[in-house]
Amino acid sequence: MERILLDYFRCPDKFADLDMRKDLSAESGFFQFGHGITCYGRCAGGLPSQDVERQLTDTFNSVRVEQDRLCLPFDFTEVVNNIRYERYPSTHGSSLGKITGGSTATQIYYLVRPFLPVPVRRHLQRAYLNGWEWISFPHWPVDFTIESLMEQVMALILRSSQVARIPFIWFWPNGAPSCAIMTHDVETESGWDFCSELMTLDDSFAIKSAFQLIPESRYEARNSSFDEFRNRGFEVNVHDLNHDGSLFRERTEFLRRARLINAYAEEFHAQGFRSGAMYRNQSWYDAFEFSFDMSVPNVAHMEPQRGGCCTTMPYFVGKILELPLTTIQDYSLFHILGDYSIDLWKQQIELIVQRHGLVSFITHPDYLVEQRAQGVYLDLLSHLARLRAEKKVWIALPSEINSWWRNRHQMRLVPDGDDWRIEGPDKDKAQIAYASLKDDRVVYSVGVANPTLVSK
């Protein structure tokens, strides 16, 4: 059970000696583990609820220390995976979504979608997403359930073991406080035609980005056309098969499409994937041959498939590394909320950087062609460049984060006299951090000269 904590922090094994109560409930449901931390799974110390809107049992006071081992009132691995893999029930589908959610209606929508003017699509999508602001879980605008759960357990370990601080391998290379990626999903031929100019905009702020390209039906995306992306230092990944909204609708058809997608990945020399419209089924990811995926939102209130992984940190789905989407998409910001500013993006960025997470964006060249939207995007690039200069946020390509996180997963801390040292690939970029308690909260310190970083 402690493995999932060790993989998150990369701390020495001896600091994560966990056990769980034997009297867990027969059924899974929602419960709390301290103020503001919503969990889903089996628990002790009360009955879990099938309705997240009800007052939930708080299991925090059911923690025990038995034979010098911290004994949790739930299966830690089960709960974390239930949240990350979206195994909890979602009860907040809009009424229009329930009416039009069938395969026939969806197929018709995606068939006519390329011919629908943006105002018509905007009207339909606003109706579909009606009531999103009343969803209580996951938490808008960013959900930190996994981070809070990890820190809550770390705090309990610090208290029960009476250790002043616990060493671990810092989340990002060279002591960076956080990380950011810019990605562009190319949906139409007009978007494809704008890619070169969009790369120039990104380059004007020294920000490299990743372009996700649809292999079939929308435009002619072939490997021979990708030289400009690669020569200019940008990245190419696969975006669905044909973006018709049906990739995960039926298992047999999904497997057929997955084989084609894997073949396109080889042709594109692509390491990463993102599904169309962020549709997903993480339990089917074993059919993919990608190194990383970018299809799971942190909180999916503004997506056609509700839910969310409730973390801003990368995590593994089998052999695939998931890089979650942690900010609102440009289309939703501009056309659903009607907000042509970076205020919401700035709010999300600030929250994520405070928690040392991954700030990930999806913007579309198809929508950034319009001058008003392009002006907002330039403001966003300028803000990211300031964060890099002033706060040392690491702005990277998705493939670079994939490489770092996989290497960090193989690193370990080993004793070195009275101290510790890091062993493993990329160890020269890694830094030792320490978790300790301050005013009953977990705080992090990184390196010798760095100030304490407080986990909010």
Image: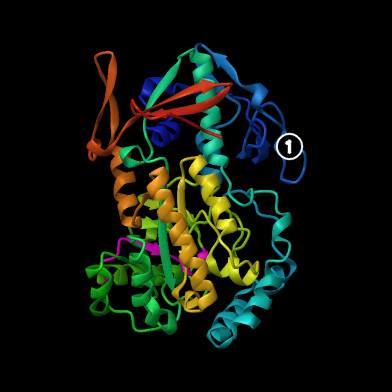
Asked if residue 143 can be seen in this view, the reply is yes
In the rendered image, the vertical position of residue 207 relative to residue 427, given as above or below: below
Q: Nearer the viewer, residue 341 or 257?
A: 341
Q: Nearer the viewer, residue 191 or 218?
A: 191
Q: Position of residue 204 (x, y in %)?
A: 35, 66
In the rendered image, the vertical position of residue 315 relative to residue 12, given as above or below: below
The residue segment tinted magenta is 268-279
Residue at the far right in the pictured view = 54
In the rendered image, the vertical position of residue 145 relative to residue 43, given as above or below: below
Q: Is residue 99 left or right of residue 145?
A: right
Magenta span contains residue 277: yes
Q: Is residue 339 left or right of residue 215?
A: right
When asked about the image quadrant of residue 382, the answer is bottom left
Q: Position of residue 45 (x, y in %)?
A: 69, 26
| Residue under the image location 63 percent in, 66 percent down | 339
Q: Quadrant of the C terminus?
A: top right
Q: Nearer the viewer, residue 217 or 335?
A: 335
In the rendered image, the vertical position of residue 266 relative to residue 312, given as above or below: below
Kind of residue indicated by mark 1: Leu
| Residue under the image location 56 percent in, 42 percent down | 144
Q: Secondary structure at mark 1?
A: loop
Q: Which residue is mark 1?
A: 56
Asked if residue 246 can be seen in this view, the reply is no
